Image: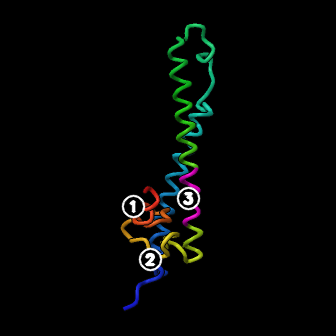
Amino acid sequence: MSEKIRYTDEELQEFKELILKKLDKAQRDYELLKANVMNSDGNDTADTSPTFKVLEEGASTLSKEEAGQLAQRQMKFIQHLQAALVRIENKTYGVCRETGKLIPKERLMAVPHATLSVEAKEGKRK
């Protein structure tokens, strides 16, 4: 039996459903992070109160910076998931871009936006 070169349409549909679920959750998480950064939960007189403490302001700034970094990472994750959907449509999903072989289904279930097999990824680190 020859080696499989791509996933079947049924398998691709299964991956697509998984990715769409992850994409939906990622977009909701991104919106929450973005709201935190933008402080869209309201500006009231507490923001301008002269009794605020410098440490609290510093912690708030740090928290916003962390949320901003998390939002950037989340957006990158969303872009990777969207690119995976394009590969599904092109029927190239699950093919390692280094070796040209199929990435194991278990890896794609864990990391659905993967474009490298474990072997290829480990080879890049060396």
Residue type at mark 1 is: Ala
Measure how far apart labels 2 and 1 are at the Cα level. 15 Å
Residue type at mark 3 is: His
Name the residue that disc number 1 marks.
110
Percent position of residue 12, x then y: 48, 75
Image quadrant occupied by the N terminus: bottom left
Q: Residue 48 shows which numbered tag?
A: none
Mark 2 or 1, which is nearer the eye? 1
Few, some or many residues within 10 Å of mark 1 (<14, 14–19, 20+)? few
Which stretch appears magenta?
76-84
Picture quadrant of residue 4 = bottom left
- Residue projecting furthest to the top: 51
Name the residue that disc number 2 marks.
11
Most common secondary structure along the magenta stretch:
helix
Image quadrant occupied by the C terminus: bottom left
In the depicted view, which residue is nearer to us: 10 or 94?
Answer: 94
Q: What residue is at 46 percent from the left and 63 percent from the top? A: 112
Q: Is residue 92 above or below residue 113?
A: below
Residue type at mark 2 is: Glu
In magenta stretch: residue 80: yes
